[in-house]
Image (spheres, grey):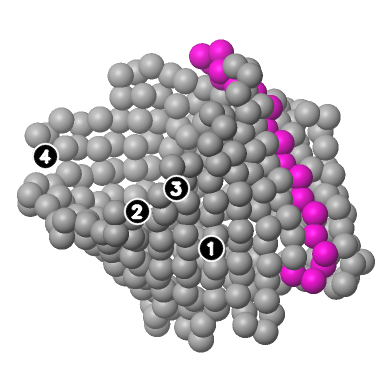
Amino acid sequence: MVSINLKLSVSTIVLVGLMAISLPHNANAFGDRSAGGGGHSWQGQGHSWNVQGSNGGGGLFSRQASGTGEGNSTVNRSWKGKNGKNASATTNRNWNKNSKTLTRNTTGTGPNGGSWTGNTSATKTENGWSHNGSWTGPNGGTTTNQGTVTRTENGWESQGSWTGPNGNTSTRNETVTKTENGWQHNTTWTGQNGQTVTNNGTVTGTGNGWTNTGTVTGPNGQSSTYNNTGTVGNGAIQQNQSWTGPNGQTYTRGTNLQANQGGGVTKTITQPNGQTRSWTATPVGNEQPGAGDPTDGTGQPPSNLAQ
């Protein structure tokens, strides 16, 4: 059964963001949680979810993992759609303790038969980490990315750049500053044409959730505002998003993620026009992760379910 029991605080919110990309956390799990200790291989039983959509769509999503206990692991994912089209991907991960570098190499095949590859690496530094990657699509075009994250006395800073198949580059610079009840974030994107977009906002933890408010200013100087709230309780995570454009019109969108008795979750999205869509992911056979599986210990459905 999927269990949702979160208590949000300033430290929780910040740590969740850091742990999602923290090299020491992810990397040490490969070596320290292997079955029987370092040097022993393990084979996860894998997980499968039957996904049913309110519009009739859906299919079967499966994930299996295995590793050597020496910092290497392999994750296989597959999606079998109701329309007969399938997709799959294999990711090989490696943690090098000496260089403190985590690498991921992925190959995938899309539902129309096209293949793609992705190669990324992240290296721990004294005050943060650096990362780079490349992705090649079915048409042979390649996009590359590189950047750094640096911890500061009261937050962190990150810089990154992306170069597309045409050779043009975009950049992103962000500063995050911790506050008493959350943090402030200031982000600037500069596009391939040199024009910039800024996003300045504040995230505040509440008793049972959070708020995220801010302003986005486009290259023409016009601004839009957003006011998002989230609550956690009763086995559910509820998010409400509000966006007011430069013309003064406001749009709202709601998302609810509900844990179901017996396992699985239901995700419901309420669109700005009031219409709703939902997907339910149910474990197939209630499979549990294999002993020492460090890559899928939650047993939860894919986090990007029907985004």
Q: Earlier in the sequence, mark 4 or mark 2?
A: 2
Check disc 3 and report the residue beneath it. 140
Q: Nearer the viewer, residue 250 or 285?
A: 285
Per the model, the C-alpha gap separating discs 4 and 3 is 39 Å
Using the numbered discs, state the Cα–Cα distance from disc 1 to disc 3 in whole angstroms: 18 Å
Is the residue under label 1 in contact with that under label 2 (CB below 8 Å)? no
> Amino acid type of disc 1?
Thr
Q: Earlier in the sequence, mark 2 or mark 1?
A: 1
Q: Nearer the viewer, residue 74 or 223?
A: 74
Which element carries disc 4, helix, strand or loop?
loop
Q: Inspect the image, locate mark 4, and give the three-letter code of the amino acid beneath it.
A: Pro
Start and end of the magenta stretch? 52-71
Q: Which residue position is annotated with label 4?
A: 246
- Would residue 203 appear left or right of 300 to someone viewing this image? left
Residue closest to the eye, 83 or 112:
112
Residue ID for mark 1: 120
Q: Viewed as shown, does residue 134 lie left or right of 228?
A: right
Above or below: residue 210 compared with residue 130: above
Crowdedness near tag 4: few (<14), some (14–19) or many (≥20) residues, C-alpha within 10 Å: some
Classed neighbour count for the residue bearing mark 2: other residues with Cα under 10 Å, few (<14), some (14–19), many (≥20):
some
- Can you see residue 301? no
Horizontal side of residue 13 vs 72, given as left or right: left
Spot occupied by residue 238 in the image (x, y as percentages of width and height): 48, 36
Outermost residue to the right: 36
Circle 3: is it few (<14), some (14-19), or many (20+) Cα within 10 Å? few
Q: Looking at the image, is mark 2 or mark 1 nearer the viewer? A: 2
State yes or no: residue 61 in magenta: yes
